[in-house]
Amino acid sequence: METFRIVGGKPLKGEIAVVGAKNAALKLFAAAAATSSEVVLTNVPEIADVERLADVMRELGVRVENTAHGKYSIKAESFTTTSLSREHAPKIRVSTLLIGPLLARKGKVTLPHPGGCAIGKRPIDIFVEGFTAFGAKVEEGEDALTFTAKKLHPARFVFPFVSHTATEAFMIIAASIPGKTELVNVAMEPEVVQLAGMLRQMGAKVKGDGTSVIAIEGAEKLKGAKVKVMPDRIEVGAFAALAAATKSDIKITRCDPKTFEVPLAYLAKIGVPVEVGEDWIRVKPARELKATNVTTHEYPGFPTDIQAPFTVLLTQAEGESLVHETIFEGRLFFTDKLNAMGAKITLLDPHRAIVKGPTPLRGKAVESPDIRAGLALVIAALVAEGESTIGNIYQIDRGYERIEERLRALGADITRVSQ
């Protein structure tokens, strides 16, 4: 078991480069299974979740090779099984994206009930409804679902609520089915747009990505592709919150500020001085941080994945802030750990919390509950006076590449300790 030992309470300084987006890379991996030709992905983040999905795909018979840092060659020439790994698949929810390629190419797939982060209620019902619309039949067992299809057909599917993972799953299967599919009330994230670009490169005709309606004309046979994974806008948010909370001067490089405009507007409301370039953002120390209400929303709104780091930031702001988490129930439960460090946060219900500040934070031993809250606790420890230890850091490794090395380059006192 590994932990982070952190001594906080001092400002940081320097540049930190953003790596490839986790939420894009995983979907591109899954799409690569829809073709028997080679797919090459670059700027892939070297994180635990990528390796998890790679293991799931390897156990299906897919060749997945890490040929250089951040570069992967994927070739799903054939499948040796249609059953997803009972060991690895339940640990990563994005394994549901492999249903489409297996259904389209083999007509059958068995999926152990998916897991991933334990954030609120994340049912698989929408995937069952969607794949059924494409002509699949679903049989539910005690610990697995089996999807079968003699012949898939295009569909018009209206999402009852916005889901980026389901949007991407149905984009991938639609690209594999000749004929026109229409997906309504879809996710509009930049990661969805990148997946659409990859599917176009593979031979599907995709229109409307970046809007609420996507039309896809599937191909008889999808081709290979070469794609550079987009920068991780979620890392940008975490690093910006870190800089503002520690009153540091940090330049965030290799990013795309155009995908980060709403969080930038929130930083301005909080009183954080920010300079923006073509591919960089510089956060400067603020004289005073002002309380601001934050409400998460699907893109282009405020991302749920940076809510936790911004909640830490608001503990250092003058006044009372309301954080309203509209996407995942229970994602604010990590605030009890911030309170143990000295924060004054009142949880009103699973979706809303009042943050009173500024409050000095103090070092504490805490456990990382999930990917995003885990990094938020790292930020809190860097704000806090004294020494903190953070356990269960595998959760952090799932989403952030070599995070302690990158933070040390900014002057952070953070060490990975094996126990």
Image: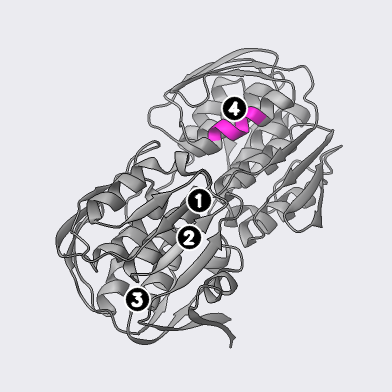
Locate the C terminus by quadrant. Answer: bottom right
Which residue matches tag 2? 251
The answer to the question of whether label 1 and label 2 lie on touching residues, with beta carbons closer than 8 A, is yes
Q: Is residue 225 magenta?
A: no
SS for callout 1: strand
Mark toward the start of the polypeptide (3 vs 2): 2
SS for callout 3: helix
- Residue 312 % position (x, y): 31, 66
Mark toward the start of the polypeptide (4 vs 3): 4
Which residue matches tag 1? 280
- Along the viewing direction, whichever of 63 and 128 lies nearer the viewer: 63
Indicate the amino acid at tag 3: Val
Between circles 4 and 3, the one closer to the viewer is: 3
- Residue 233 % position (x, y): 49, 48
| Cα separation between marks 4 and 3 | 42 Å
- Residue 295 % position (x, y): 26, 46
| Residue depicted at 59% across the width and 27% down the height | 171
| Cα separation between marks 3 and 2 | 18 Å
Binning the other alpha carbons within 10 Å of mark 1 as few (below 14), some (14 to 19) or many (20 upward) gives some
Q: Which mark is residue 383?
A: 3
Indicate the amino acid at tag 4: Met
Mark toward the start of the polypeptide (1 vs 2): 2
